[in-house]
Image: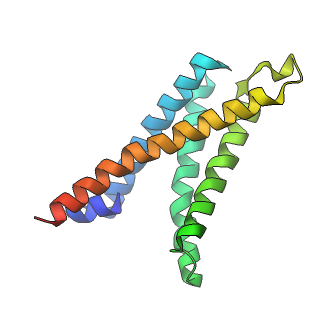
Amino acid sequence: MLLLAHTFIINEEVSLGLYILIKYIANFWIAYRLRKYYEVKKETITIQAIVVTISDYLYFPIVSHLELFNIGRELLMMLTIYGLLKGIVWAIIITFFIKTEIEEKDNILDKISSWAFGVFLSIFSDLAIAVPVIWVGFYFQSL
């Protein structure tokens, strides 16, 4: 989003607001999509979207803080932080907000599959947002 902000010469706070709005809409869609497959209370969909959006936003302050120690831009470190944030937040959501058949059976695979499904959709939504932004940024930068 910062690349898009510099491309269109808009304020970084505006681009951050746009990023949070787009991520909230995407996360709301993911939470609503999970409702089709798992038993999710209608009231908790908004809470799930807010929790995932906050965790998506937390990635940027963590990486910028690690840049002070010259380790924030290493690809392996960035992917590790990204994976940990996604994994932890979806584990919290699966544990507290999504009822699966694990309460009725001793089947841990149901929880793991719902966790993996949420992480996959979340990563897919990140790519769906990032790829057009990067493409537009490089396109306008080459003009």
Most extreme residue toward the bottom is 69
Report whether residue 76 is seen: yes
The image position of residue 71, as x and y in percent, is 58, 78
Residue beneath the point at 51% across and 63% down: 60
- Viewer-proximal residue, 74 or 4? 74
Q: Nearer the viewer, residue 135 or 39?
A: 135
Q: Nearer the viewer, residue 96 or 124?
A: 124
Q: Quadrant of residue 31?
A: top right
Screen quadrant of the C terminus: bottom left
- In the rendered image, the vertical position of residue 127 relative to residue 110, given as above or below: below
In this rendering, would 104 be left or right of 18?
Answer: right
Residue found 53% across the figure and 45% down from its top = 53
- Compared with 37, 31 (above or below) is below
Number of dots carrying numbers: 0
Q: Is residue 1 left or right of residue 117?
A: left
Q: Residue furthest right?
A: 106
Can I make out residue 41 in this image?
no
Q: Residue at x 75, y 22 (%)?
A: 100
Left or right, 78 with reference to 98: left
- Residue drawn at x 54%, y 66% is 61
State the image coordinates of residue 138 (x, y, percent, origin top left).
Answer: 23, 61
Q: Is residue 104 left or right of residue 7?
A: right
Quadrant for the N terminus in the image? bottom left
Quarter of the image where one finds residue 115: top right
Q: Does 108 sit above or below residue 73? A: above
Quarter of image, res 136: bottom left
Query: Residue 110's x, y, as percent?
Result: 75, 26
Note whether 45 is above or below 88 in the view shown.
above
The type of colouring in the image is rainbow
